[in-house]
Image: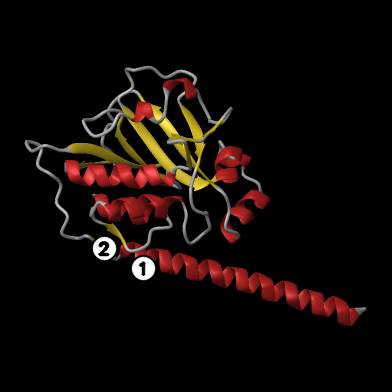
C-alpha cells in the first residue's frame, strides 16, 4: 500500500511540476513574442485624409475591435440586425467584435462565474467558438485601454473581410445564438475556427491587425502584447 501511495504521490508532484513549467514557458513566450513588432512601418492615415477610425479596447484580459456601425463600405446592421439586441436603435454609432471560447464567453459574464472546469477546457482542448457583438452608442474616449487607429478605406475593407469570415454563415446570414448576451446591447453568434490557449481571443485581434498591416506583435495571447504596440 505504501508503495502505491508513493507512486501516486510522485505522479501528482511530477504533474504539478509539469503544469507549472508549462505555465512559465507560456508566460515567457508571451512576453518575448509579444514584445517583437511586426508592421513597424505602419503610420496612421492623417486626419485630413480619407480614413476610417477604429478602436482596439482591452478590459485587462480580453481585447476587442471597435468599428463604425455604418460607412460607405458596410452597414453592419444589415448583418447584425437591431432586433437581435434588446435595447439598441439607429442612433448607436459603433459596434464591437470579439472572438473566443463559446462556453467561456457565455457562462462567465463576470470573473466570479468562472469555474475550474470551464477554464481548463478552454485552455487545454480545441473548443467551439462564438463572436461577441456589442453596439456602442457614442465614440469612445481614447485611453490606454481604448486606442484609436486611423486606417485607409482599403485597410478597412480588408478588416471587414477578416471579421466577416470569422462568423459562421448560413444563406448569407450570421447564425445568432438566441437568448445570449450580458445586456440589452450585446449578443453572441456562432463563430468559425477552434479556440485553444495558443490561439485565443487576443490572438484573434492581433491577427486582424496583422491583416491590415497595423503595428502589432508577432504573437499576442495576452492583452498587453496587443495594446503596447498601439501607444
Mark 1–mark 2 CB contact (< 8 Å): no
Foreground: 17 or 157?
157
* Quarter assignment of residue 153: top left
Rendered residue at 46%/65% (across/down): 27
Foreground: 226 or 191?
191
Q: Secondary structure at mark 1?
A: helix
* Quarter assignment of residue 39: bottom left
Where 92 falls versus 192 (above or below)?
A: above
Q: Secondary structure at mark 2?
A: strand
Q: 10 Å neighbourhood of mark 2: few (<14), some, or many (≥20)?
A: some
Which residue appears farthest toward the front when viewing the image?
171
Tell me if residue 146 can be seen.
no
Foreground: 163 or 180?
163
Residue where numbered disc 2 is placed: 37
Rendered residue at 63%/73% (across/down): 17
Give the label, 1 or 2, closer to the camera.
Answer: 2
For the N terminus, the quadrant is bottom right
Q: 10 Å neighbourhood of mark 1: few (<14), some, or many (≥20)?
A: some
Residue where numbered disc 1 is placed: 32
Amino acid at each position: 500500500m505504501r508503495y502505491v501511495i508513493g507512486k501516486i504521490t510522485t505522479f501528482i508532484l511530477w504533474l504539478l511540476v509539469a503544469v507549472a513549467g508549462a505555465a512559465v514557458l507560456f508566460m515567457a513566450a508571451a512576453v518575448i513574442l509579444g514584445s517583437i513588432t511586426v508592421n513597424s512601418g505602419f503610420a496612421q492615415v492623417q486626419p485630413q485624409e480619407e480614413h476610417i477610425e477604429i478602436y482596439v479596447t482591452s478590459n485587462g484580459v480580453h481585447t476587442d475591435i471597435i468599428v463604425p456601425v455604418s460607412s460607405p463600405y458596410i452597414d453592419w446592421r444589415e448583418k447584425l440586425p437591431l432586433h437581435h439586441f434588446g435595447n439598441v436603435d439607429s442612433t448607436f454609432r459603433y459596434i464591437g467584435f470579439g472572438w473566443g471560447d463559446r462556453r467561456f464567453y457565455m457562462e462567465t459574464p463576470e470573473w466570479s462565474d468562472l469555474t475550474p472546469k470551464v477554464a481548463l477546457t478552454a485552455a487545454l482542448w480545441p473548443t467551439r467558438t462564438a463572436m461577441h457583438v456589442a453596439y456602442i452608442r457614442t465614440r469612445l474616449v481614447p485611453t490606454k485601454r481604448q486606442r484609436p487607429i486611423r486606417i485607409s478605406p482599403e485597410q478597412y475593407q480588408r478588416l471587414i473581410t477578416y471579421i466577416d469570415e470569422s462568423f459562421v454563415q448560413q444563406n448569407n446570414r450570421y447564425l445568432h445564438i438566441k437568448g445570449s448576451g450580458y445586456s440589452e446591447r450585446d449578443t453572441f453568434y456562432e463563430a468559425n475556427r477552434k479556440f485553444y490557449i495558443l490561439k485565443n481571443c487576443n490572438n484573434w485581434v492581433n491577427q486582424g491587425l496583422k491583416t491590415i498591416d497595423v503595428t502589432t506583435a508577432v504573437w499576442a495571447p495576452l492583452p498587453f502584447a496587443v495594446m503596447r504596440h498601439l501607444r
